[in-house]
Image (tube, rainbow, N blue to C red):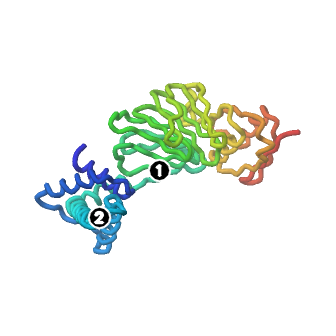
Amino acid sequence: MDAQDKIAKILQKLETGTCTPQELEWLQNWYESQETQPVHAFRNEAHKQQLQTGMLQHIHAQLEPVSAPVVRMRYRWQIAAAVFAGVVGAAGWWFFNSWQPRHHMMIVQAAAGEQREMLLPDSSRVWLNAGARMEYPQEFGEVRTVKLDGEAFFDIQPDEHHPFEVHTPEINVQVLGTSFDVKAYSTLDETQVTVKTGMVKVLHGQKGLDVLSANDQLTFSRSAQQYMKSKADNQQINEWTSGMISLSQAGFAELALTLENQYGVHIRYNPAEMKRDEYTLRCSKQLTITQVLDLVSSIHPVQYDIKDKEITIHRKN
């Protein structure tokens, strides 16, 4: 790890209050080894003072035990001040010109009926399904991390030194280089990870749930706080990226959300009434909403009424 990367890491820890005394000492030694200081990079004097106050508070919290003797306290505060001088002076330019882009978050969302393909900073490819939202930094750091609400298919560039992680409200997915699908709509009870190639590790919080390889599918239930592992058809894992609506043994809530995202409609239904059946649906996105509902009602005992963008669906008696 070079000096700039180490400085970045310590700066991040200063921001979160997790920096160790050893890391602060390394910063001080690094600063003292510099013959000259680069140009400062502050927006104005008030900005400089604001940064100084915040960083000194973080450093002070790390170095200052409550019962420390007065002499020791004074010495540690001098270290804190010296470290701040080094970070703000010698690393100031780098902090604002290198650290900030990595923390400038990009937000991409696929509208109703839209499918978006995009290239991430590491040249990994992502396809967002209708209604999905993804957040990622303008530049990746040591860990390539994205946040997802909705469904996306990932084709990740291999990089053993920079793991890739997908964070969802319920589970996280860790990979090195592979292709996989994550379905994580915050309005649905279940989050699903399906691997097309390679391997991924799935976690709930800090707890590892399972390791998945090609054709493995993990379904995590928020309400039950449990997961189930099964097999998937490799050809169907990401066929939605090529213009298909593809559901396999989905609950009605997932079917309704899929149709709402695809056609920009609002579907009203009684959850208690519609929870009995599971729905498997494979059809072209080129079909109209009426054609899709006719297809569903030809298989399941449901009926529907359409008024503009409002659709009401009932179970037939």
Across and down, in percent, residue 224 comes to: 66, 39
Residue in the foreground of this view, choosing between 183 and 167: 167
Residue at image position (60%, 26%) is: 230
Check disc 2 and report the residue beneath it.
69
Given the image, on which type of amino acid does mark 1 rest?
A: Glu
Across and down, in percent, residue 316 comes to: 85, 39
Residue at image position (45%, 37%) is: 174
Residue at image position (48%, 47%) is: 147
Element type at mark 1:
strand
First along the sequence among labels 2 and 1: 2
Check disc 1 and report the residue beneath it.
135
Residue in the foreground of this view, choosing between 41 and 121: 41
Given the image, on which type of amino acid does mark 2 rest?
A: Pro
Say the numbered circle drawn on residue 178: none
Q: On the image, which quarter does residue 225 sit in? A: top right
Residue in the foreground of this view, choosing between 120 and 174: 174
Q: CA distance from mark 2 to mark 1?
A: 47 Å
Residue at image position (57%, 30%) is: 217
Farthest residue, direction right: 317
Across and down, in percent, residue 46 comes to: 31, 74
Tell me the crowding category of disc 2: few under 14, some 14 to 19, or many 20 or more residues within 10 angstroms, Cα based. Answer: few
Farthest residue, direction left: 35
- Which quarter shows the C terminus? top right
Across and down, in percent, residue 92 comes to: 25, 61
Element type at mark 2:
loop
70 displayed left or right of 152: left
Q: On the image, which quarter does residue 45 sit in? A: bottom left
- Which quarter shows the N terminus? top left
261 displayed left or right of 200: right
On the question of residue 74 being in view, the answer is yes
User: In the figure, 273 relative to 36: above or below?
Assistant: above
